[in-house]
Image (tube, rainbow, N blue to C red):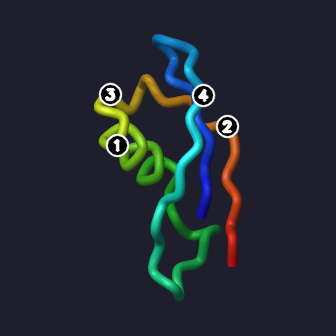
């Protein structure tokens, strides 16, 4: 899936892919897990992530 998010401290908008297992149901994945993944990727606390959009590319 592709996501876009804003870093609250800087206002920077980032887009990136997030890999999911082929049989994963996007509707069953907790948003908090996606935010944690993005926070780890960006090196910030989860509270700094503002999720903007999610696209499922399948």
Q: Secondary structure at mark 4?
A: strand
Which residue sits at x=49%, y=12%? 10
Q: Which mark is residue 45?
A: 3
Q: Disc 1 versus disc 3: distance between alpha carbons? A: 10 Å
Distance from Cα at disc 4 to Cα at disc 1: 14 Å
How far apart marks 2 and 4 lie (CA) works out to 9 Å
Mark 2 and 4 residues: CB-CB less than 8 Å, in contact?
A: yes
Of the numbered discs 4 and 1, the one sitting upstream in the chain is 4
Q: Secondary structure at mark 2?
A: strand
Q: Where does label 2 land, which residue?
A: 52
Q: Earlier in the sequence, mark 3 or mark 2?
A: 3
Q: Nearer the viewer, mark 2 or mark 4?
A: 4
Side of 14 where 33 appears, left or right: left
**Rendering coords of residue 32 (x, y %):** 45, 47
Residue shown at 52% from the left, 65% from the top: 29
Left or right: where does residue 38 sit relative to residue 4? left
CA gap, disc 1 and disc 2? 16 Å
CB under 8 Å between discs 1 and 2: no
Examine the rendered structure and indicate whether residue 56 appears above or below residue 16: below
- Sort mark 4 into few (<14), some (14-19) or many (20+) by Cα contacts within 10 Å: some
Residue pictured at 61% horizontal, 57% vertical? 2
- Residue designated by label 1: 41
- In primary-sequence order, the first of circles 4 and 3 is 4
Q: Give the mark toward the camera: 4 or 3.
A: 4
SS class, disc 1: helix
Please name the residue that numbered disc 4 is placed on.
13
Q: Which mark is residue 7?
A: none
> Considering the numbered disc 3 on the image, is that residue within a helix, a strand or a loop?
loop
Q: CA distance from mark 3 to mark 2?
A: 17 Å
Dot 2 or dot 4: first in sequence order is 4
Image height of 14 relative to 48, above or below: below
């Amino acid at each position: 899936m592709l996501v876009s998010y804003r870093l609250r401290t800087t206002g920077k908008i980032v887009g990136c892919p997030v890999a999911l297992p082929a049989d994963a149901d996007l509707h069953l994945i907790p948003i908090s897990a996606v935010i944690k993944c993005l926070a780890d990727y960006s090196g910030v606390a989860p509270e700094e992530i503002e999720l903007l959009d999610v696209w499922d590319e399948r």
